[in-house]
Amino acid sequence: MKKKKILFLGESYRADAITWMNGLKEFGDFEIITWELKTPSNCIHNRILRIFEFELAIFKIKKIIKAQQPDMVIAERTTSYGFLAALSGVKPVAIAQQGKTDLWPEKSISLPLKKLIQNYAFKKADLIHAWGPVMTISMLEANVDMNKVLVLPKGIDLTKFGNQNNANPEKICAIVTRSLLPEYRHDIILKSFALLNQKGIDFVLTIIGDGSQLSKLKGLAKDLGIENKVNFTGRIPNTELPKLLQQSNIYISMPITEGVSASLFEAMATNCYPVVTDIAGNQSWIKHRENGQLVTVDDYKMLSEELIWAFENNEHRNEAVLKNRVFLEKNADYNINMKIIANKYHELINTNSSN
């Protein structure tokens, strides 16, 4: 039997996108074709070029559709690729909201246009992915037909992220796995560890990943006198991540906005105790001082205090990480969730072809 084809519109190099596509190949036996914008949005000049590229994108996509005849189109981000999927003319269409809302940044002058684009994408989509409950809030506000919404994370591969943990129990072994971008507030994390250092508390801090802030953050660690205790690994292969998580006892993430964080799930799976920002995207999964800790955005003093509390309450941490693993096995197992998503796509394709 001929494989069903899916056209994926989105940044195919992103870990999130790779998980989604691999799951569809593995559990749905789909053939995946990809298309994405080629211009990076890393400076004003490129952002202008990207807008031009976006305006011409639909012609390129329709050309691919004509040549490849996909059975379905899926897309990430309701305000960009999701809109293009809605315009493609292919049915069925599944779109995924990436953050708490894709209407970002909040004070952007293009917000009214983004709202129009998003509403069109929501209306035309046959299936809308909310990777977590926090995403449904903005969907309800936009009067989305909630019968079309599937609230389910893609999940993570729990066989790769095993629950054995061999962190040194005698000190804080903290890990940060978010991109080195301003919105992830690595500077706040470094400042909180400078306070721990002043108090004579022993620690090792591992910062994984790359991004525009790397040299600035290295400089800050040096200025704060903690560069010997901070390890910037740079970008690493995803296969090395489980081992580094298993050598850590505390996971830290301080973003100012959050959708559904696979990084948080990966840490919870490897028995890392989560200390994260007190924002809606994290509140869906973490209850303060029950299965992790919630810290006010940009409050490095509070972060340092919560880290001390977490470290001193060893028994609480041990109980919490076991609960977190069980929760993930029930709610965020990639092998279960991606099977559900793949089956849903087959169902949509079959329904559509019989109409």
Image (spheres, helix red, strand yellow):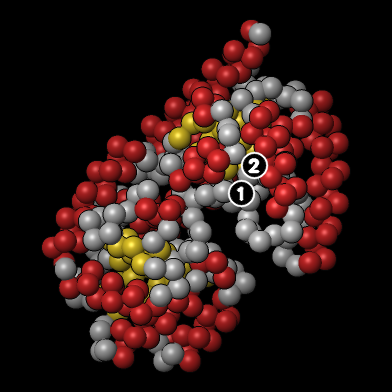
Mark 1 lies on residue: 102
Amino acid type at mark 2 = Thr
- Which quadrant of the figure has residue 242? bottom left
Q: Is mark 2 on a helix, strand or loop?
A: loop
- Dot 2, how many residues are within 10 Å of its Cα: few (below 14), some (14-19), or many (20+)? many
- Which quadrant of the figure has residue 326? top left
Label 2 or label 1, whichever comes before in sequence order: 2
Mark 2 lies on residue: 78
Residue sitting at x 46%, y 85%: 221
Residue sitting at x 24%, y 61%: 289
Residue sitting at x 28%, y 43%: 327
Q: Is residue 294 left or right of residue 6?
A: left
Q: Distance between the residues labelled 2 and 1?
A: 6 Å
Are the residues at dot 2 and dot 1 in contact (C-beta closer than 8 Å)?
yes
Q: Is residue 14 left or right of residue 221?
A: right
User: Horizontal and vertical percent for residue 150?
Assistant: 49, 31
User: Horizontal and vertical percent for residue 298?
Assistant: 45, 73
Amino acid type at mark 1 = Asp
Q: In this view, does 152 lie to the left or right of 75?
A: left
Q: Is mark 1 on a helix, strand or loop?
A: loop
Residue 215 visible in the current orientation: yes
User: Horizontal and vertical percent for residue 160?
Assistant: 37, 47
Give the label on residue 192, or none: none
Between residues 117 and 345, which one lies in front from this camera angle? 117
Between residues 65 and 278, which one lies in front from this camera angle? 278
Residue 239 visible in the current orientation: no
Residue sitting at x 52%, y 49%: 100
Q: In this view, does 317 lie to the left or right of 283?
A: left
User: Horizontal and vertical percent for residue 85?
Assistant: 71, 34
- Dot 1, how many residues are within 10 Å of its Cα: few (below 14), some (14-19), or many (20+)? many
| Count of residue discs | 2
